[in-house]
């Protein structure tokens, strides 16, 4: 940007600001959606990976699109799309049908223009299904077989889900199973953490993230109308109340934009922390009123942004994190990195 004035004596012929804008000739976006059957009904067990190539240039975009790698899927896929010609302002879509079990995808790709220019891209996308609770789970810290309809493993075989420092010893050292469901009144979450060393007594609530603890953040925003900083972000663990020596299950609201405060005694929130063998189970019932930022219904077949993580401390500081989605770890606190979760009834 530059301010330009053209004058001769007392005469001014031009006085204004000149703005130079650079726009990448091609952009790539990646999205995961349920596959539609022949009647237009969503099949949530099949995922459509949609890769959109947008031509931002005033001339046709001609060249080859090359997918270097897609992390997070096991399905074989075509990786080279040659002789593409995309008109100005238009987009070219590549659709792949994937099996269920997809949670987080990272794709490295490049568009090789015929004039020799190469534009590189790294994109991420997420997909999860949260099924309706036909029977409400018991918030008792014991996860029975079949009690939750949605479940995902977070362990060492997933480069997205585990963040650790040495000496990290693998899944027995720290990994987790995350279960979740919903109904018209509540969201239900259970995180079972396999942890060979329990170290969870935080001297204060706001410091629980440095100890063994559980965190989640959420926003119900199917219309995508809220800012990325608007959410509810919760830290749940064992903290020692001031003036006592005994640690108790404690909620710390990190970000709270909801209609009702989750840590109010009458909020309807229920939670428990249970230790069984080498596993710590965090189980919570979260009323939608403590997540929603306006009065509205939570409807099936809509999307919900959600992320969860559990922290591990073996006595020498925060050692590992297992996460479902991103947007909490590192302090970013942005819903743009949350999991896109479909609420299915």
Image: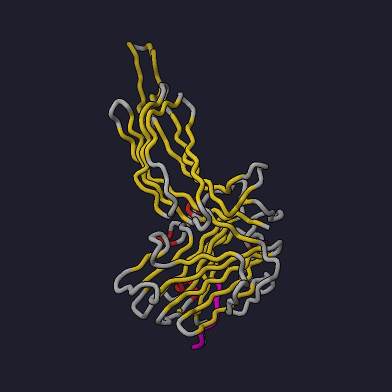
Write down the quadrant of residue 8 in the picture. top left
Q: Residue at x 48, y 62 (%)?
A: 324
Q: Is residue 246 magenta?
A: yes
| View extreme (bottom): residue | 245
Q: Position of residue 170 (x, y in %)?
A: 36, 72
Q: Position of residue 17 (x, y in %)?
A: 40, 25
Give, as a single range, the part of the protein colored magenta.
245-251
Instruction: Pick the quarter of the image with the N terminus.
Output: top left
Write down the quadrant of residue 306 in the picture. bottom right
Q: Residue at x 42, y 67 (%)?
A: 155
The way the protein has been coloured in the rendering is secondary structure
Q: Position of residue 88 (x, y in %)?
A: 45, 24
Above or below: residue 71 compared with residue 79: below
> Which of the pair 230/213 is nearer the observer?
213
Residue 23 visible to an observer of this rendering? no
Above or below: residue 150 compared with residue 61: below
């Amino acid at each position: 940007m530059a301010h330009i004035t053209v004058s001769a004596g007392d005469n001014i012929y031009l006085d204004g600001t000149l703005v130079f804008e650079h726009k990448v000739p091609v952009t790539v976006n990646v999205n995961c959606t349920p596959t539609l059957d022949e009647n237009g009904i969503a099949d949530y067990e099949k995922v459509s990976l949609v890769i959109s190539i947008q031509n931002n240039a005033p001339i046709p975009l001609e060249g080859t699109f090359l997918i270097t790698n897609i992390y997070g899927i096991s399905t074989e896929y075509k990786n080279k799309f040659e002789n593409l010609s995309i008109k100005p302002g238009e987009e070219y879509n590549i659709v792949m049908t994937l099996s269920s079990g997809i949670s987080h995808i990272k794709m490295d790709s490049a568009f090789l223009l015929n004039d020799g220019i190469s534009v590189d891209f790294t994109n991420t996308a997420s997909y999860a299904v949260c099924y309706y609770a036909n029977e409400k789970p018991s918030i008792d810290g014991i996860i029975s077989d079949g009690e939750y309809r949605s479940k995902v493993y977070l362990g060492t075989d997933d480069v997205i889900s585990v963040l650790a420092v040495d000496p990290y010893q693998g899944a027995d050292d720290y990994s987790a199973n995350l279960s979740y469901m919903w109904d018209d009144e509540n969201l239900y979450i259970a995180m079972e953490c396999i942890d060979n060393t329990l170290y969870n007594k935080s001297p204060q609530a706001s410091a629980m993230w440095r100890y063994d603890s559980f965190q989640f953040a959420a926003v119900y925003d199917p219309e995508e109308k809220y800012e990325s900083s608007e959410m509810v972000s919760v830290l749940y663990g064992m903290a020692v109340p001031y003036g006592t020596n005994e640690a108790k299950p404690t909620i710390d609201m990190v970000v709270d934009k909801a209609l009702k405060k989750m840590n109010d005694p009458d909020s309807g929130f229920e939670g428990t922390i249970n230790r069984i063998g080498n596993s710590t189970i965090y189980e919570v019932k979260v009323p939608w009123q403590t997540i929603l930022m306006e009065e509205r219904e939570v409807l099936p077949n809509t999307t919900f942004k959600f992320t969860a993580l559990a922290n591990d401390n073996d006595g020498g500081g925060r050692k590992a994190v297992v996460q479902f989605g991103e947007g909490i770890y590192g302090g970013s606190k942005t819903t743009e990195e949350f999991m896109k979760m479909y609420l299915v009834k």
